[in-house]
Every structure is written in structure tokens, then in C-alpha cells.
Image (tube, rainbow, N blue to C red):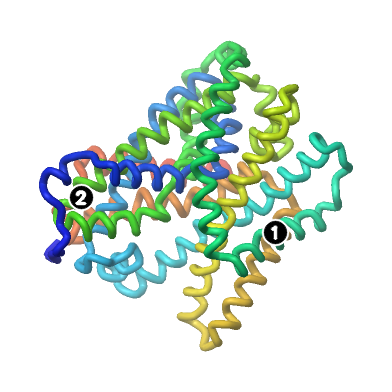
Amino acid sequence: MNSKCSTISSPRSINKFTYQDFTWCLSLFGTAVGAGVLFLPIKAGAGGFWPLVFLALLSAPMIWFAHMSLARFVLSAKKADADITDTVEEHFGNTGANLITFAYFFAIYPIVLIYGVGITNTVDSFLVHQVGMASLPRPLLAGLLIGAMTLGVIFGKELMLKVTSALVYPLVFVLLALSVFLIPEWNTSMMQVKPDFSTLPSVIWLAIPLIVFSFNHSPIISQFAKEQRIKFDDQAVKKTDTITCGTAMMLMGFVMFFVFSVVLSLSPEHLAMAEKQNISVLSYLANMHQSPWISYMGPLIAFCAIVSSYFGHYLGAHEGLVALIKTRLSVSENKINNGVTIFIVVTTWIAAVINPSILSMIETMGAPMIAAILFLLPVYAMQKVPAMAQLKTALPIQIFTAVCGIASITSVIYSAL
């Protein structure tokens, strides 16, 4: 990286972990902690306690190495202010840039559909079990919720972004409080499920896509890497490595504590029932718990997590599809924007009415594209792009990252077959 910047920090600030570094850890952490975490205990705990232990140990290096590699990929661009699309275009040309935009859209758009289903089921479950109402007609309920969330984005985007950013930290705090609150409910029913070590690798393999989805914070990596480069120039890689490592440790510690606490407070039958009902684990806990705190806070937390995640992913999907259409059609941008909005809202409403399995949608639609961009693209660039020569991670890390990415994609194919 040859560009120089007048605001390069001192060697001491590069090597020292600062408050600004911690703030970035929180930002990356907040991007990862969303609605996916609320479904993680259902799938991760389905194989029993011991596969969950192995998944917890695997999650930290898997998530760190992938995001560290993606940050290094962004840092390999000639321009200091290049984002991931600029970097792909520089290394792989216009075709590569179009492919990455296409892949980003299909990594984000299915998640919008997932949240359309999730918000409908969360509110329906709350109305039936906590309020005591009869279920509203599903097309009406889904239309009202999806329409309201979309209008919030269209007419109050800046306000919604501020609100969703502000929601992250209370959400994290309440999830931590809930994890501690459930400790007296822990039981040994999950541990009594005898591990079948012959099937353990396949159980872990099939759960990897949900880990990838739930811990993914790649959407913010591009901006994160740009800011570190502007501040630290050639030494930015040290900062991105350190901060992504800190984020991975926080995710493993906090999220897996939440997952373990929930799983240990339930039985395998409870987790299977939550998956069958197609609701988040918080909604399920609210329906079966006597505590008023969980009965009302559980659905509220789930609602806030899904709504906040919907806003960000809707914007990403909308921008991605508009960019794809603009390069192919000579139509006014206003018409494209309106057409894309209608397409996303209508298809999300259809998905919410049909009510497909949320876990299946995460595994089959969301995770593969995320894995391709997050795990495989940087490793491929390390082997093929000269600018990555000085930014390569160690060969064992490259192999591990590539294997995890391939495992995520192939497990989806295997499940589909």
C-alpha cells in the first residue's frame, strides 16, 4: 500500500489497544448480533450438548480468520478510500465487480424474506399467547407489519438508522441479563443425550451455515478497513487483525453463553417444538415460562432484534438490486427505486404468508452467498492477486478458512438433496 496520509498514528497507538479499538469491536459485534442469534440455540442445540461445545470452540477461529482475511482484502486496494466493490473491480475488473454486487444482493435479499416471516410469527405468537387474542388473518398481519417497517425505512431512513443503532446495546444487555436469569433453570437433560461420536462431524458440518449467518459482520468490514487504513496507512493490517480478533472473542463469549444458557434451560423436545412452531427461541421461552418478565420481554426483544435487522438488510438489498438494474436498463432511477421497493415488499409478504421454515431459509438461502464472499473470496485473492502477496495470512489459516467456507456451502447442498 503506497498511499500516505497526514493523519498516520504513532507506532505506540498502533501496538496499543485503545478505546477507539474497543468501540470498533462493539460496532462489529453489534452488526453480528441480530435476529439470527435468536434462532441459533434451536439449531446449534439440536445435536445435543457435546456437539454444541465443539461448535463453540470452532466459532471463534472460524469467524476471526474469515473477517480478518476480508479486511486484508479491502486493504489491498491502491486507493486508500476503496470499498470492497472498488477492490474487486481493481483486482478482477468490471465483471468481478458485477459478480460481487450480484452475490451481495443474493446474500442479503433472502435475509429480508427471513425477517418478514420472523416478524409475522413473533407478533402472531405474542397476540395469541400473551395477549389472549385469536390469530389475525395471516395475509393481513404480514401486510401490516412488513408495510409499516418498509414505510419506516422509506420516510424516516436517518431516524430508523439511529434508532436501530441505539437498539443494539440495550438488546445485548437484555440478552446477557436473560442468559444469567435462566441459570437457575439449567438442567442436565441435554447432557444426558449420549454423544454419537461417529455422527459428530456431520452434526457440526450441518450446523456451520447457521454459525456463519449468526456471527456474520461482513457488511461493515469494508467501512471498518477503510477507516483503519486512513488512520494507520501501511500498519492498518495490525489494527484490523487485532480488532477482528477481539470481536470474535466477544462473540464467542457472549453469544455462546446465551446459546448455552438457553439450551441448558430447555430439553431436546423443547428445541424441536420451537423449530416446528417456526418461532425464535425467545418467543418459545415466553410461551412456556411462568415469569412475567420473560413472557413479555422475550417477544419484545425478538421484535426489536428482527425490526432492527430488517431495516439494515432492506437497505442493502434495495441498493444492491438498484445497482444491478441500473447497469442493464436505461430507465429513470426513480422508476427503478419504486419498482425495487414494490418487488421486495411483495415477495417478502408472499414469503410471510407461505411461512416456510426460517432455519431452512437461513441454511439454504442466506449462508451460502455469505460464505462465498466472506470465506472463499479473500483466500482466492491471496493466491491469485499480486497486491495480496504482503497481506496473506499463514497457509494453515488460509486452508482452515477455505475449508469452513466450502463446508458451509456443501452442507447446504447436502441438506437440499
Please tell me in which quadrant of the rendered image residue 184 appears.
Answer: top right
Of helix, strand and loop, which one carries label 2? Answer: helix
Question: Is 255 left, or right, of 298 in this rendering?
Answer: left
Residue type at the position of mark 1: Ile
Horizontal arrangement in the rendering, residue 129 relative to residue 188 (left or right): right
Q: Crowding at label 2, few (<14), some or many (≥20) Cα neighbours within 10 Å?
A: many
Residue 228: x and y in percent read 25, 54
Vertical position of residue 339 compared to residue 204: above or below: below
Quick one: 77 or 201, which is closer to the camera?
Answer: 77
Relative height, residue 21 to residue 285 (above, below): below
Q: Is residue 405 visible?
A: yes
Q: Earlier in the sequence, mark 1 or mark 2?
A: 1
**Residue 16, quarter of picture:** top left
- In-front residue for pair 373/260: 260
User: Disc 2 designates what residue?
Assistant: 237
Residue 266 in picture, x, y percent from top left: 64, 21
Q: Indicate left or right for 75 with 84 as reference.
A: left
Residue found at the very far right of the displayed protein: 134
Mark sitting on residue 146: 1
